[in-house]
Amino acid sequence: MSKECLEKVTQTISFLAQPRESHLLLLTEVQRDRAAELLGLRACNFRPRHSSKLGNEFRVFTNYDPGERLGGWEQEQ
């Protein structure tokens, strides 16, 4: 997903979502900084696996503490 596409997704979310709404997005690892910057999302410890062996590593990002359900948030380095 390009930077422009994620920016448009962010605009759509802000238009449709209620204030303080929970967000969960599945993005590639390379989108980590943009997800944090644009939506305040943090990476979860849960790492989806794909049977087709896609080249990009995917991650789950949330703006809420996912607790045990998604393995919690990944520790910031």
Image (tube, rainbow, N blue to C red):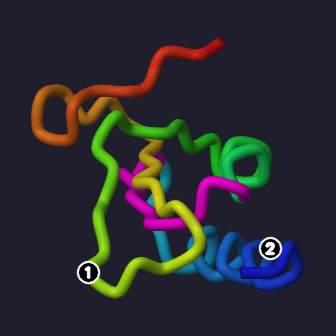
> Residue lying farthest front?
53
Q: Where is residue 64 in the image (x, y as percent from the top left)?
A: 37, 36
Residue 43 highlighted magenta (yes or no): no
Nearest to the observer: residue 41 or residue 55: 55
Q: Which amino acid does label 2 sit on?
A: Glu
Task: Check disc 1 and report the residue beneath it.
Answer: 51
Task: Check disc 2 and report the residue beneath it.
Answer: 7
Residue ID at (40%, 78%): 53
Label 2 neighbour load within 10 Å: few <14, some 14-19, many 20+: some
Q: Quadrant of the C terminus?
A: top right
Question: Is 12 situated left or right of 34 in this image?
Answer: left
Nearest to the observer: residue 9 or residue 44: 44
Nearest to the observer: residue 72 or residue 37: 72
Q: Position of residue 19 (x, y in %)?
A: 49, 52
Residue ID at (31%, 75%): 50
User: Dot 1 lies on which element?
Assistant: loop
Residue ID at (86%, 73%): 3
The image shows residue 33, relative to residue 24, as above or below, that is above
The image shows residue 20, relative to residue 23, as above or below, that is above
User: Dot 2 lies on which element?
Assistant: helix
Q: Quadrant of the N terminus?
A: bottom right
> Residue lying farthest left?
69
Magenta segment boundaries in residue numbering: 20-30
Q: Which of marks 1 and 2 is nearer the N terminus?
A: 2
User: Number of callouts in the render?
Assistant: 2
C-alpha distance separating marks 1 and 2: 29 Å
Residue 28 highlighted magenta (yes or no): yes
